[in-house]
Image: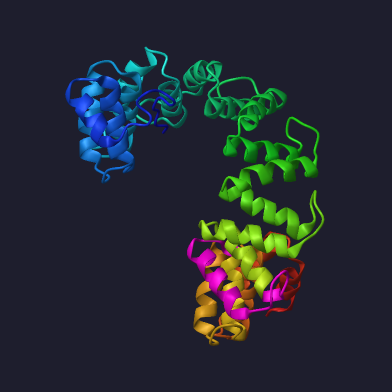
Amino acid sequence: MKNTIKKNNPYSDMSAKQLKVLAEQGDAEAQCRLAYYYEKGKGVEKDYVKAIEWYTKAAEQGHPDAQNNLGVCYNHGKGVEKDYAKAIEWYTKATEQDSMGAQWNLGACYYFGTGVEKDYSKALEWFFKAAEQGDSWSQNDIGICYLNGYGINKDPVKGVEWIRKAAKQGFATAQYNLAGCYKDGDGVEQDDRQAVKWYTKAALQGNMWAQHNLGVCYEYGDGVRKNYKKAVEWYMKAAQQGSNKAQYHLGVLYKNGLGVEKNHRQAVKWYLKAANQGEPWAQNNLAICYERGEGVRKSYKKAIEWYTKAAEQGNVIAQYNLAECYELGRGVKKDIEKAVEWYTKAAEQGDQEAKERLLSLP
């Protein structure tokens, strides 16, 4: 949900101490800004309870930003017990004064079904109101609705038009989405170079998904000259933000010495981070490391553990590897029935080797 506060007004340069003097005199703008300072810890120690106190005072005087921000606090349970009904109430009051932020927030509630029944059409009503005021978040979300046919007739071309409006305003999420449209040829002619252009804009703003995808482009040479060092650079940025896919890719590059000096221990480090987040390819590769003793002490028990996690998520390579372990009794008691079970799962996904092994089993 989106907080709002007026910018570039006489209150912008005031300290929390100066604002408090005015706030205590009943100045709603000062009350709202002081609350925001407490919420964000700007010039004062972060204190959600005090933020709620001052937002409430300003909101009760009809201050639209305070009403919207108070709604956000109730929505997320910041400084107050979570209460979606209260959030909706305050968002609605703020929208009555054409608060752009509240329009988007209320639209998002209908979009996700937060405190109200999910209704894409109602979400769009509010997104359009905010978009008319130039809100980039709403422009992006209108685009997403057009791309997917949420609450409106599916129209990828219009979807791209709306996402582009937001992207041109510098909204990183929209830039990432626009890049995806170019990458997939969704609503626009497929163009890997344009995808790289927009991924880069979003990645430079810290968008984790764009950083990961930009790494993929550099690793495989999609829309840009192949450059493993650049791939490592962007994967690292995304991985440090917690992207399990980027962590997995980093592991692969360290294992193979692509763009970075070969280092099995570093490969294991990144595979483990991704595997613990449930990334099946990382789980399979981590199992291989344990089975071979690459970058980690050999442990068939650990290998079986990670193969199983990946196989249960449908990873076809892990299913085959796990089946082989059961067939040969490697790290687990030999069990032909289990081997058949996992070879079958892999074969059903089209793995030719699994099909051949099934034919050779008794």
Spot occupied by residue 259 in the image (x, y as percentages of width and height)? 72, 69
Q: Which residue is painted at 56% across and 84% down in the image?
A: 334
The chief SS type of the magenta part is: helix
Query: In the image, which residues are magenta?
Result: 255-280
Is residue 237 rendered magenta in the image? Answer: no
Is residue 274 rendered magenta in the image? Answer: yes
Label total for image: 0
Quarter where residue 112 is shown: top left
Quarter where residue 114 is shown: top left
Q: Can you name the residue that lies furthest to the left here?
A: 24
Q: Nearer the viewer, residue 337 or 253?
A: 253
Give the quarter of the figure containing the C terminus: bottom right
Regarding residue 326, the answer to whether it shows in the image is no
Q: Is residue 20 above or below residue 295?
A: above
Quarter where residue 1 is shown: top left
Spot occupied by residue 10 in the image (x, y as percentages of width and height)? 37, 23
Color style of the picture = rainbow
Regarding residue 62, the answer to whether it shows in the image is yes
Q: Which residue is painted at 50% across and 24% down in the image?
A: 120
Spot occupied by residue 109 in the image (x, y as percentages of width and height)? 41, 28
Q: Is residue 68 left or right of residue 187?
A: left
Q: Which residue is painted at 34% across and 41% down in the image?
A: 40
Q: Nearer the viewer, residue 277 or 90?
A: 90
Q: Nearer the viewer, residue 273 or 23?
A: 23
Spot occupied by residue 289 in the image (x, y as percentages of width and height)? 60, 79
Q: Is residue 16 above or below residue 217?
A: above
